[in-house]
Image: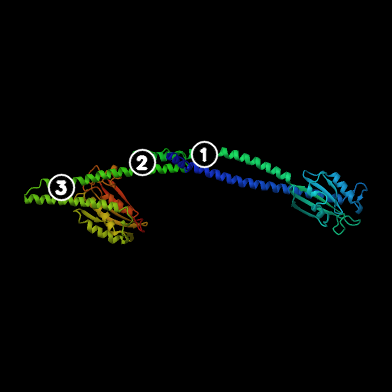
Amino acid sequence: MHVKTRKWHRFLLSARTRILAWYIILMAASSVVSIFAIRQELFMRVQDRVQRSLRQEVEEFRKLANGVNPDTNRPFTRNEVTALFDLFVSRNIPDDDEFLLTLLNGSLYKYSPSALPEPLQQDSPLLQRWGKLTKPERGQVNTTPGELLYFAQPVRITYQAEPLDSTAEVQGVFVVAHITTGEREEVDEAIAVVVRIIIIVSTAASVLAWIVAGRVLAPLRLLTKTALSISHNSDLTQRIPVQGTDEIAELTLTFNEMMNRLEDAFASQRDFINDASHELRTPITIIRGHLELISDDPQERRETIDLIADELDRMTRFVDDLLILAKAEQPKFLCLETVDVGSLTEEIYTKARTLAVRNWRLDSKGCGSIVADRQRLTQAIINLAQNATQHTQPGDVIALGSIVRNGKARFWVSDTGEGIAYNDQKRIFKRFARGVNGRRSEGAGLGLAIVQAIATAHGGQVELSSQPGVGSTFTLIIPVDSPVA
């Protein structure tokens, strides 16, 4: 029971279900708003059409009243109001739900059609009010059969003045009325048809949306499956096939790139552990072997103690290098200050000359200041100089120099030693990497990795230019402005 509940809970909260739910909500909301807007628009059009029809009937009545009586071939006179009403009602056929009414002395005279609704019956309040009108009036009232629109035109006929002169006495009232119940029912029927069609179309569209959402989200399910497979099997070689160029494809590419980085990181971590264990195991084995073979001879004891001390010093340097690399990834790795490039170059050159007997040279000293960690930069350049001494002979040249140009400071160490094989030039900055020609044959193989870490912490980089048998030049490039640390 609990498993079924979890499955239903996962189904209801899945992205596919939520997409479909939001789709249905948006479709329903837009449909309701659209139906309401369409209904109101149709009602307004019905009302406008009825108003135009009412005005047309009144205009036709006015035209007839201002014209000639066909029986006398003369304008209508005051005593011919009934003839005017009879002639107009007999000539005009009202539209559906439209009523032509004539009133004499406040009472209903002639009308068309013959069947009138209750609000237009004789002695109704509406007719009594129309019978007392002295000026044209139009409006709408709510009645039992429905909304009623009307246009009432009082009739004034004199001998000399115009038939509808507003200064003359009112002889009667002409009214055209229209009950919009029929049109509104037609509108409601049309809206009902629209609603049924929208429901059918929305249902079909929702089914299609469910299918399309499933296909769109298929890469996400594959991503989840791959991630679960990786977590269960620790297999970092799996990748998701990229299809299309949309956001899902971009997410798939990002996931695959992340897997590449994870695979490289795990491989690097595995190599690091293997190399570190080897680097630590060797001095421990040497120390243990000499301790087991130590004798009572004082001279041999001193030699054993010196050897153990040397191996312990090597282990200490190795651990210190590992700590430096670990700290390089922390925000407080650098202690920034304003450093004069020229004086720093001269200080480093003075210290480097004591590393070994070589033909030391100072190429140039840069002019300007940078924001950097003086101690870390000194450590990096001394590491490069120490690395150069290990792969040169006493007669070889080792040159140091610096220059400030284009917003960057460049510190270089060049030598005329054995150089570096082309295949090794990209990998020697990795931890524990060693060249096949013996480059970095001493130490734990962390010196250049530390140089790279210090340059990266300053927002800079290390460049290498080397040719086997000719020599190498390592250049430390540091931005003049405050580094990203």
- Disc on the earlier residue, 1 or 3: 1
- For the residue carrying disc 3, how many other residues have a C-alpha within 10 Å: few (<14), some (14-19), or many (20+)? some
Identified by mark 1, the residue type is Trp
Amino acid carrying mark 3 in the image = Ile
Q: Residue at x 52, y 39 (%)?
A: 210
Residue 191 image point, x, y percent: 66, 43
Give SS at disc 3: helix
Camera-nearest residue between 404 and 396: 404
* Mark sitting earlier along the chain (3/2): 2
Asked whether 182 or 405 is in front, the reply is 182
Seen at 26% across and 51% down, the residue is: 322
Q: Residue at x 7, y 51 (%)?
A: 299
Name the residue that disc number 3 marks.
Answer: 287
Q: Is residue 395 visible?
A: no
**In the image, residue 93 above or below residue 154:** above
Would residue 111 be seen by someone viewing this image from the given angle? yes
Q: What is the spatial separation of the Cα atoms under label 2 and label 1, in whole angstroms?
A: 30 Å
Q: Position of residue 175 (x, y in %)?
A: 81, 51
- Badge 1 crowding class, 10 Å Cα cut-off, few under 14, some 14 to 19, many 20 or more, is some
Please state which amino acid type lies under the numbered disc 2.
Ser
Residue 210 disc label: 1
Q: Quadrant of residue 4?
A: top left
Which quadrant holds residue 370? bottom left
Which numbered mark, 1 or 3, is in the foreground of this view? 1
How many angstroms separate mark 1 from mark 3 (CA)? 70 Å
* Sequence-wise first label, 2 or 1: 1
Mark 1: secondary structure: helix
Label 3 near label 1: C-beta < 8 Å? Answer: no
Provide the residue designation for mark 2: 231
